[in-house]
Amino acid sequence: MGRLTADGVASVTVEGGNLCNDPSKQPVIVESLVKMRYAACLTGSADTDSVRKDAGNAKLAVVPPFDPAHPDQTSWIIELGSARVACLRLEPPGQTGEEAWERALVSSLTALRKRADVVAVASRLSEAENRRLAGQLGPAGLIQAIFVAPANCTPDLPTVADGVLLCPTKDRGQAVTLLEAERAGGKSWKLSCRLETVGSAYAPDPTIGDLVGRYYQSRQTTLAGATAEKPLSEASYAPAPRCKPCHAKAYDVWQKSVHARAVATLREKQRLVPECLTCHSEQFRRNTQFDADLAAEDDGVQCSTCHGDGIVHALTRGIPALSREQTCGSCHTEGDQVHGAFSTEAALRRIQH
Ligand code: HEC
Ligand code: HEC
Ligand code: HEC
Ligand code: HEC
């Protein structure tokens, strides 16, 4: 999995998994990719620009299949040493009509195929559509690999459909999808695909840590600036101390829990940034602002994160009763590979209050 060198390569490694538009996921993904010494990453979002700069410094090519700056561009060729990898973005036909869409697809694939050693497709189509395309375009050698989002395909891939490699992807930077292309002796490339877990197994690299740290630092400063201009005027939820008089036991249990410490955790890591606050801070979740001076017990994963804003309820002596609108799954993922397995049933017992 060595990084590419300028003097020709026998293999290239491309990550193509995290095709999501959620900017909060980008830095985590890039950090992992760089640590793992990838050559290129097919990804992209509205926020890719700032990340691309850091990745560029770290010699990771970030290819933006969904680049808002170039909404009409659907294909890219990246030069990786002596190898050329063509990347194509594939979205459902939408208004254009099936036939026109397929004609356009075949012609752009044909063009790319002539200029590239490997063609990788980032697909947002359904599993059935991906397989149909593989059947139609695979034997002619037009597509060699398709990266598919978990929502669009069964998770037990990779599989080969009509000679085309279907590579499963995962988001949240939990795992990255590696497409490895190896040139064995002659000219033909042998492709394989695997999921690589991102996590503590990858020892921190001080140079990358510094780059990523600077990125987060600038995010933190920007957010603080925006919040200073637009101060939090009114509370959009009743903070935990407002619940305490009537739910003393629940409050005590909560206060000792890690949910109450969720912002403190980020402060220790110097990550008071939107990417992380989006799950760790109720204040940010409700207002997309963050006032670092808010009392500790008023923020974090609050009572109101799980029970609704609680404003009327707290004022009307418990009537109407609160719903539990927030599921655990919006922040915790079953079988999360980074933090170890999360079981909702066991976790519910652990937060019993
Ligand atoms: C999608 C929601 C979500 C986002 C976004 C998120 N976290 Fe977390 N974080 C969690 C959850 C859930 C846990 C508890 C995991 C567990 O232990 O089961 C957690 C736990 C942690 C912990 C303590 C446990 C550990 O693994 O060390 C740290 C530190 C942490 N997060 C840092 C961050 C940082 C830094 C960011 C931003 C780069 C971030 N988190 C973004 C949901 C999130
Ligand atoms: C992480 C989500 C979460 C947080 C944070 C949380 N709760 Fe709950 N709460 C729940 C869930 C889930 C239940 C239902 C538990 C069950 O059915 O076993 C519950 C139950 C309750 C109940 C009803 C208990 C009963 O006997 O029926 C009260 C009252 C309550 N919570 C108050 C609070 C207060 C006050 C806070 C903050 C100090 C808080 N909760 C924080 C998720 C949460
Ligand atoms: C003035 C007192 C008071 C305050 C303040 C208060 N509650 Fe309650 N809460 C009640 C009463 C009374 C009930 C009904 C208890 C019952 O039916 O057994 C209740 C019930 C609940 C329940 C259970 C609802 C259900 O359907 O079983 C939850 C959850 C809850 N409160 C959460 C909160 C949260 C979160 C806050 C803070 C935002 C809060 N409460 C503030 C008095 C209060
Ligand atoms: C808004 C996001 C969010 C929601 C919703 C949420 N959690 Fe959490 N949870 C977190 C974060 C963030 C942490 C880690 C906090 C830290 O360590 O700083 C965490 C930590 C935990 C932990 C401790 C894990 C450990 O390894 O110590 C348990 C248990 C837990 N949550 C259970 C639940 C349950 C059960 C629910 C649903 C009723 C729930 N959480 C809903 C964000 C959330």
Image: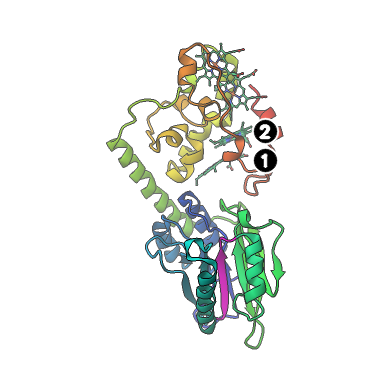
Q: Main secondary structure of the magenta part?
A: strand
Q: Is residue 227 left or right of residue 343?
A: left
Q: Which residue is mark 2?
A: 347
Q: CA distance from mark 1 to mark 2?
A: 7 Å
Query: In the current view of this chain or complex, which residue is farthest to the bottom?
Result: 186
Q: Which amino acid type corresponds to the residue marked 1 in the rendered image?
A: Phe
Q: Is residue 93 above or below residue 353?
A: below
Q: Judging from the image, what secondary structure is the residue with disc 1 in?
A: loop
Q: Is residue 245 left or right of residue 175?
A: left
Q: Is residue 231 above or below residue 61?
A: above
Label 1 close to label 2 by CB (< 8 Å)? yes
The picture quadrant where one finds residue 33 is bottom right
**Which of these two is toward me, 104 or 100?**
100
Mark on residue 91?
none
Q: Is mark 2 within 8 Å of ligand 4?
A: yes
Residue 257: give x, y in percent of width and height.
58, 28
Q: Residue at x 45, y 20 (%)?
A: 311
The picture quadrant where one finds residue 133 is bottom right
Q: Is residue 306 above or below residue 315?
A: below
**Which of these two is toward me, 131 or 178?**
131
Q: Is residue 335 above or below residue 237?
A: below
Q: Residue at x 71, y 33 (%)?
A: 346
Which quarter of the rendered image does ligand 3 occupy? top right
Q: Which residue is mark 1?
A: 342
Q: What stretch of residues is rendered in magenta?
A: 116-125
Instruction: Confirm whether the magenta stretch covers residue 15.
Output: no
Q: Residues within 10 Å of mark 2 (few under 14, many from 20)?
A: few
Q: Judging from the image, what secondary structure is the residue with disc 2 in?
A: helix
Q: Which amino acid type corresponds to the residue marked 2 in the rendered image?
A: Ala
Quarter placement of the C terminus: top right
Q: Is mark 1 within 8 Å of ligand 1?
A: yes
Earlier-in-chain disc, 1 versus 2: 1
